[in-house]
Amino acid sequence: MAIDLASALAAGKHALSEPEAKALLEGFGVATPRSAVASSAAGLASAAADLSPPFAVKVVSAEGAHKSDVGGVRLHLEDAAAVEAAVQTMPTAEAYLIEEMAPSGVEMVVGGYRHARFGPVLMAGFGGVLVEILDDIAFRICPINRSDAEAMLAGLKGAPLLSGYRGAAPVDRDALIDVMMALGGPEGLLMQHADTIAEFDVNPLIVSTKGAVAVDARARLEQAPTEVPRDAPDLSALLAPNAVAVAGASASNIAHGNLYIRQLKAFGFAKPIYPIHPSAETIEGLKAYPSLTALPESVDYAYMAVGPKAAPDMLAAANGACLLYTSPSPRDLSTSR
């Protein structure tokens, strides 16, 4: 099934049905269950002869509502008679989808959306019908590489479930990352169709010990604007600061500020770094200054690892001229209650 998204948009279509979204996925190498589409219960029962049970049957719709919420999904159907009977209890639809059920595994969600300023953004996390309740999702700006995908998975609260939990076998992590790359990699679906796809969700993606299968998928279509919205925030000071001030570094010990300076250096930040300290002359080999107002130039970004007593004066000295990030110690948090 060839999907011409530009033509679909031009014709006024703003969403893809599940079969259409899956056909798009297959073009990027993502596995989907063997399936067939029919317009009647009898047609589905006939199609079941070419598939292997157990079956799943769903209404075909491009609407945004969850099919399971409106009774549009039936699972674990063992034969053609069960398929035909199930359709009789489902909402009336122009078409129905029958497919082989995927092997059991961990239910994930992988997808993304087009951000007004950053472009395609990939999401990945734990999915299924509880995706909103679990709220265990990671995001990355596209394109990603495999290391990015690994980091996204490692940051999930449920990450141990992927590695084998309480005796369970580990899932096929490579297959999961393959799907993430198929959507968010340099040649991925979100990058290739950035001008036409506003949102794309695979939920659930069932990841087992032997692969990953996209069990459901949806897409929302919208032509990308030709210009960045004028009200989009300017994040250049955050993403490419001209200089960084660091308050809370120590001349004699290792504090949060010292670690941040070392991280900036390790990352290769080549712009000026100004430690702020009331009395030290140098910190981490850099000239220190007693306050933000004593700096030789304005800075775009200030990292403050100071306690609540010092924070108000530091904020007042910034006078809104820079972005500030505070990282108090646990001791400071306890004294601020």
Image (cartoon, rainbow, N blue to C red):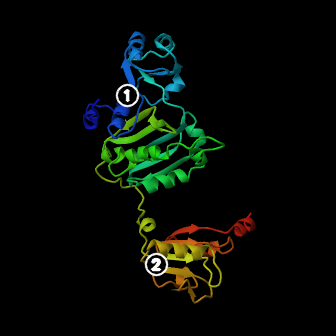
Q: How many marks?
A: 2
Quarter holding residue 221: top left
Q: Which residue is mark 1?
A: 19
Q: 10 Å neighbourhood of mark 2: few (<14), some, or many (≥20)? A: some
Q: 10 Å neighbourhood of mark 1: few (<14), some, or many (≥20)? A: many
Q: In this orientation, does residue 96 appear? A: no
11 or 113, nearer to the observer: 113
The residue sitting at 32% across, 37% down in the picture is: 27
Q: In this orientation, does residue 14 appear? A: yes
Q: Secondary structure at mark 2?
A: loop
Quarter holding residue 333: bottom right
The spot of residue 136 in percent (x, y) is 57, 46
In which quadrant of the rendered image does the C terminus lie?
Answer: bottom right
The spot of residue 149 in percent (x, y) is 46, 52
Residue 14 as seen in the image, left or right of residue 327: left
Q: Which mark is residue 298?
A: 2
Residue 298 as seen in the image, left or right of residue 10: right
The amino acid pointed to by label 2 is Ser
Closer to viewer: mark 2 or mark 1: 1
The residue sitting at 35% across, 36% down in the picture is: 26
The spot of residue 13 in percent (x, y) is 32, 31
Asked if the residues shown at circle 2 and circle 1 are in contact, with their CB atoms under 8 angstroms apart, the answer is: no
